[in-house]
């Protein structure tokens, strides 16, 4: 069974930085595709960034050059370094783990990020 726990959210000023972490349990972390998604009030949940087991990444256009996704397979932890934050980055951020061979998806409980102008 996979369990994901996010941390690191909070309040930041525009132009500031935050780092999110997602600690995973289970034995499939190293092979999983990991991602960060976000959902603002009244909007759908959208992909922010994703990283494969081999380290390949892709980002939403809105965060390219500002956010960096990374993973530590030994610690079973996913990170999202967020720089140059903007008020429009305000959302609940969710960690996702996808197992490509079964397409099973697991979600964390989410962590709130609020950016003030």
Image: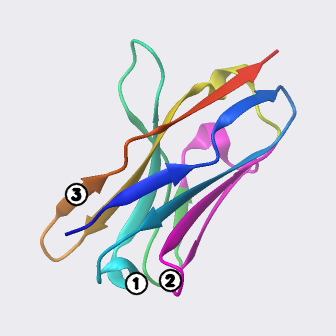
* Quadrant of the image occupied by residue 33: bottom left
Residue 30's disc is 1
Q: Which residues are magenta?
A: 59-83
- Residue 50 in percent (x, y) is at 47, 60
Of callouts 2 and 1, which one flags the residue occurring earlier in the amino acid sequence?
Answer: 1
Q: Is residue 33 above or below residue 55?
A: above
Q: CA distance from mark 2 to mark 3?
A: 18 Å
- Residue 74 in percent (x, y) is at 52, 87
Position of 4 with respect to 106 (left or right) is right
Q: CA distance from mark 2 to mark 1?
A: 5 Å
Which secondary structure, mark 1? helix
Of callouts 3 and 1, which one flags the residue occurring earlier in the amino acid sequence?
Answer: 1
Depth check, front residue: 91 or 51: 91
On the image, numbered disc 2 is attached to which residue?
A: 73
Which secondary structure, mark 3? strand
Q: Tell me, yes or no, whether the highlighted magenta stretch contains residue 73.
A: yes
On the image, numbered disc 3 is attached to which residue?
A: 105
Quadrant position of the N terminus in the picture: bottom left
User: Among all residues in the image, which is located at the extreme right?
Assistant: 15
């Amino acid at each position: 069974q996979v369990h994901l726990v996010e941390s690191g959210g909070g309040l930041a000023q525009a132009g500031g930085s935050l780092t999110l972490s997602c600690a995973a349990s289970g034995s499939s972390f190293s092979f999983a595709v990991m991602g960060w998604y976000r959902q603002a009030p009244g909007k759908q949940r959208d992909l922010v960034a994703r990283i494969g087991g081999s380290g390949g990444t892709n980002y939403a256009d809105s965060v390219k050059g500002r956010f960096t996704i990374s993973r530590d397979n030994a610690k079973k932890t996913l990170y999202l370094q967020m720089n140059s934050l903007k008020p429009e980055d305000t959302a609940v951020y969710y960690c996702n783990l996808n197992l490509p061979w079964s397409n099973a998806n697991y979600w964390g409980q989410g962590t709130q990020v609020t950016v003030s102008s």
